[in-house]
Every structure is written in structure tokens, then in C-alpha cells.
Amino acid sequence: MTDKLIIDPKGKYEPKEGFHIDPSQMGWLKKIEKSSFDMVIIKNTESSQITQKHLTNIRKILKPNCICEVYVSQIISVLQDLDAKEIESNAKLAKFASVESSIFEKFVNENGRDVKYSTIRLTLVTSD
């Protein structure tokens, strides 16, 4: 089994990049052997799908002292600080040892006009 898990509904990944699943398949994570992955990356997934139950399963399949990175990117008028706080709270309830978040903004050209996007990046670290 590969050492990186990528959860992304939009991406098409080569096997060498990591094991890829759609967010709708996160329920299957409880079936994966414990301490199987060195890293988990969650992208293009609605914050409402990143639940405590899924984060608990992710923590269990990560090796000790490893990272889960979560990227939530939405149009700036849609994304709220509450989204970050909800994921942070779920990560703490899932017993991640460390939870850090940062927010950055970028412009994306959509149909000839620049749209301002905000991205929340959360870094979750497992304990020993």
C-alpha cells in the first residue's frame, strides 16, 4: 500500500502519487489497517463532509507523528471562519495532537473575470 492518501472528488491521480478516494468513500476508511499512511491530503471537499468520525478514522490510519493537510477553497463570499472552526473542533474531538490553521486568498479567472477565492489550510498532526 502506498504511503499517501489523497481525498479529492476532482482529482485524477497516478498510483505513484498516492492512494486516491472520493470524499463520499471516507466511510470505508474504518476498514483500512491502522498506521498505513505517512500523510493524508484532503482537497476540494466541503467542510460539512469533514466530520469528527471521518477525522477519527483518518487519525487511526496515519502513522505516529504524521500529518493530515486539509484544504477548503471557496469563493470568498461563501467561505466563513466558521468552516475552519468546525474542522478544527472536529480534529480536536478526533484527538489529533496538534491543529494549526491559516487562511490565504487568491484570484481565479472565471469566464473572463477575476473571482476572489479564500482557502483554509489546516494541518493536523498525530501523536506518538
Image: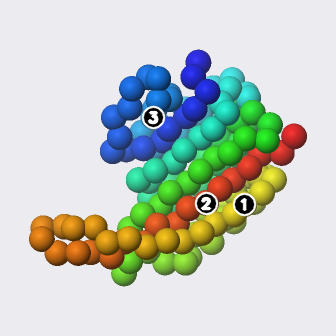
Helix, strand or loop at mark 3: strand
The residue pinned by badge 2 equals 122
Helix, strand or loop at mark 2: strand
Residue at the far top in the pictured view: 1
Q: Residues within 10 Å of mark 3 (few under 14, many from 20)?
A: some
The Cα atoms of the two marked residues, 1 and 2, are separated by 7 Å
The residue pinned by badge 3 equals 21
Which residue is at the front of the view, 99 or 102?
Answer: 102
Q: Position of residue 67 (x, y in %)?
A: 68, 45
Tell me the mark number nearer the camera, choosing from 3 and 1. 1
Q: How crowded is mark 1: few (under 14 residues within 10 Å), some or many (20 or more)?
A: some
Q: Is residue 49 left or right of residue 86?
A: left
Kind of residue sitting beneath label 3: Ile
Residue 99 marker: 1
Residue at x 50% of width, y 38% of height: 6
Q: First in sequence, mark 3 or 2: give its number.
A: 3
Residue at x 33% of width, y 34% of height: 12
